[in-house]
Amino acid sequence: MKFPPKLRMLLTVPPVGLALTALLPSSSALAAASVNKGDTAWMIVATALVILMTIPGLALFYGGLVRTKNVLSVLMQVFICFCMVSLLWFAYGYSVAFTNGSPFFGGFSKAFLHGVDVTTLAATFSKETYLPELTYVIFQLTFAAITPALIVGAFAERMKFSAVLLFIFIWFTFAYLPMAHMVWWWAGPDAFTLSAANIDAVKAAVGDSAAADFLAKLAAATDDAAKALVLSDYSMAVNASNGWLFNKGAIDFAGGSVVHINAGVAGLVCAIVLGKRIGLGKEVLAPHNLPMTLIGACLLWVGWFGFNAGSNLEANGLTALAFLNSILATAAATLAWTTSEWMTRGHPSLLGAASGAVAGLVAITPACGWVGPMGGIVIGLAAGIVCLWAVVWLKAKLGYDDALDVFGVHGIGGILGALLTGVFVNPALGGMGVTDYLATDTSTKVLEYVFSAQMYAQVVAVLTAAILSGVVSYIALMICKVTTGIRVPEQEEREGLDIGSHGERAYS
Amino acid sequence: MKYIIAIIKPFKLEEVREALGVLGVQGITVTEVKGHGRQKGHTEFYRGAEYTVSFIPKVKIEVAVDANLADRVVETIQTSGQTGQIGDGKIFVLHLEAAVRIRTGETGSAAL
C-alpha cells in the first residue's frame, strides 16, 4: 500500500506510547546500553504506587459507592482480581503482551518469565537507555491487574463471584493482552538507529543480511531525500513485528485505550447483559460510605502519578511533565464537574468532586506525556463536563445499569482523552510532538504534525479497543452463563452479596 | 399509670431529659427513629441518581409515670421540646396496665 510521503513518515516512525520491551540483543552486544539506578529506582517506586491504586484505592473507591450489604463483595472482587491477574501475568501474560508473535498477539517464549532474570534488559523511549527487564515486568503487571478490576464497578451488587473470576480470566487473556501487545509492543528506539556503530541492534531488528543491505544503501544514498527513503524503508522493516496499533501511529502515553476504553466498554457490555439491579429506579441504591469513596479516590490520584509519570520509564523532565499534567488536568476536571453540577442540580457534591477527579485522570492518561500543561487543563475541563453528562444524562437515556459508572467515566473519559491527545500533541498547541526515532542521534527530534493523520490513528485505536473489548466481553459472559451462571439469585441479591456470596457482614 | 411516647427533634433530647429530671422522672428510654408528619423531606443526588428522602431523623422517648404526674410530664415535654419550627414532633399518652422492676420484683407505682 502506498502512502503519501508525510503519512508514510508518520506511520513508519513508531510513535512512542508506552514503554515496551524491546527485542534486545544479548547484554554483551549492547556496548552503549546503560542502566541508570535513578531510572530503576523511580520505576520500582512507580510500580508500588500503581499497586496502591488497586489495593486499596480502587477497592475503597468502589466499596463506599455500594450499599452496606454489598461492600465486602466489591472489596473482595477487586482484591482477588489483583491476586489472580498477578499470577496469570507471571504465567503467560507478560509473554503474550511483550514478545514477538503476530502484530495482534505475542508468543509464549517468556511464559513463566523464562529467559528473564536479574540481568536481562528492557528498552525505554530513549536511545541507549535501558531498565532491568524485571522492573518492566512488575510495572506492567500492575497495569494488567487494575484493568479488569475496573470492570467490577459495572456489574457490582449482582454478579456471581465464580462468574467474576471466570470472566476476568477470559477477558484478561483475550481483550487485555492483545490490546497491550497491539499498542505497546515495538522494537525499541535503538533498533531505528541505522548506523554501523549500532550494527548489533540493527541485526537484532531485521536480521544479518538485511542489516548489511540497508547499511550499504544508506552509505550509497547521495542526498537527504534518498537517505530519507532508505530510512523509511528500514523503519518499515523494523516495524514489521510491532504491535498493530503501534504501527498505525496511535499515541497513548500511559494506557488510555489499553486500560480505560478497554475496561469501560467491557463494563457497558456487562451492565447490559447482566441487567439492572433489583429495585433500580424505585428503591434507594445510594452509596453507603462516601468518606470511604473519597479515601479511595485520593489513593487513586496519588497512585496515578506512578501510572502516568512512571509510563515514561525514566526519571527526567518528561516524567515531571506527565506528573504535572496529572495534577492540572485532574484539578480542572474536578472543578468542571463540581461547577457543572452546582449549576445544573443545585449542589456541588463530594461524590461529584471525586468522580470529576477520576474522569480527569482517565482523560489525561493517554495525553500526559504528549501534551503541554494548557492542553492538559483543557482536557481536564472537557472530561469533567463530558463525563458528568455521560453518567447523568446518557446512562438515564439509554437505560443500562452501569452501577458505578465504569463506562461513563473510564469508557467515555478514555475515548475523549484519546481523541484530544491527537489534538494537543501538536507542538503549535504546546504539545511535545511525536518523536522521530529515525534521527540517529539521541536528541529529541519530532515529526511534522499532521492533524488528519494523527486523528485517524487515534480513532482507529479507539474503535479497535471498543470492538475487541465488546466482543470478548460478550463471549466471556456467554461462557459464564452456561458454566457458572452470571447473576446471583434474587433472594441473595435482596439479602446482600456479603452474606450470600461471602458469609460475612461488613459492620456488626 | 401512663406510658408516654414522644417524638422530638434529636438535638432537643438533652433539654427534655433535664426538664423531666426536674419533675422527678428518672427512667427514660430513647430510640433513634425516622419519620415525618407534615414536614417535607429533601432530595439527594448521587451522580445520575436522584432520591427524594421523605423520612427525617427524630428521637423517640418513652417514659412510664403515675397517672397524676402524666399531665405535667406532657406539658414539660411540650415546652422543652418545642422550637416553633415545623417538625417539632408529637406526644402520645397510653394507659399502662402493669409495671415491674426486674431487680426487686416490685410492681405498680413502686416500679416506676
Image: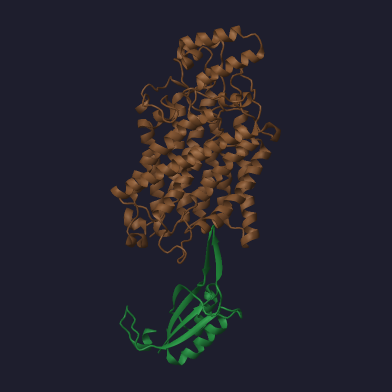
Quick check: can you spot residue A146? no
Q: For the point 40% across and 52% down, which residue is it? A: A273
Percent coordinates x, y for residue A458 in the rendering = 57, 36
Outermost right residue = A428
Quick check: can you spot residue A328? yes
Percent coordinates x, y for residue A300 in the rendering = 52, 44
Where on the picture, by quarter, is residue A97? top left
Q: In this view, does B33 lie above or below A315?
A: below
Percent coordinates x, y for residue A174 in the rendering = 39, 37
Q: In which quarter of the image is the N terminus of chain B?
A: bottom left
Outermost bottom residue = B68
Where on the picture, by quarter, is residue B40? bottom right
Outermost left residue = A483
Q: In this view, does B31 lie above or below A12?
A: below
Q: Is residue A291 above or below residue A223?
A: below
Nearer the observer, A381 or A420: A420
Which chain, by letter, is green? B
Which chain, by letter, is brown? A
Percent coordinates x, y for residue B87 in the rendering = 56, 78
**Colouring scheme, one of rainbow, by chain, secondary structure, one colour:** by chain
Q: For the point 48% across and 36% down, which residue is it? A: A48
Horizontal arrangement in the rendering, residue A282 relative to residue A427 (left or right): left
Nearer the observer, A103 or A60: A103
Give the number of callouts. Answer: 0
Q: Quadrant of the C terminus of chain B?
A: bottom left
Nearer the observer, A52 or A435: A435
Q: For the point 50% across and 72% down, which residue is it? A: B55
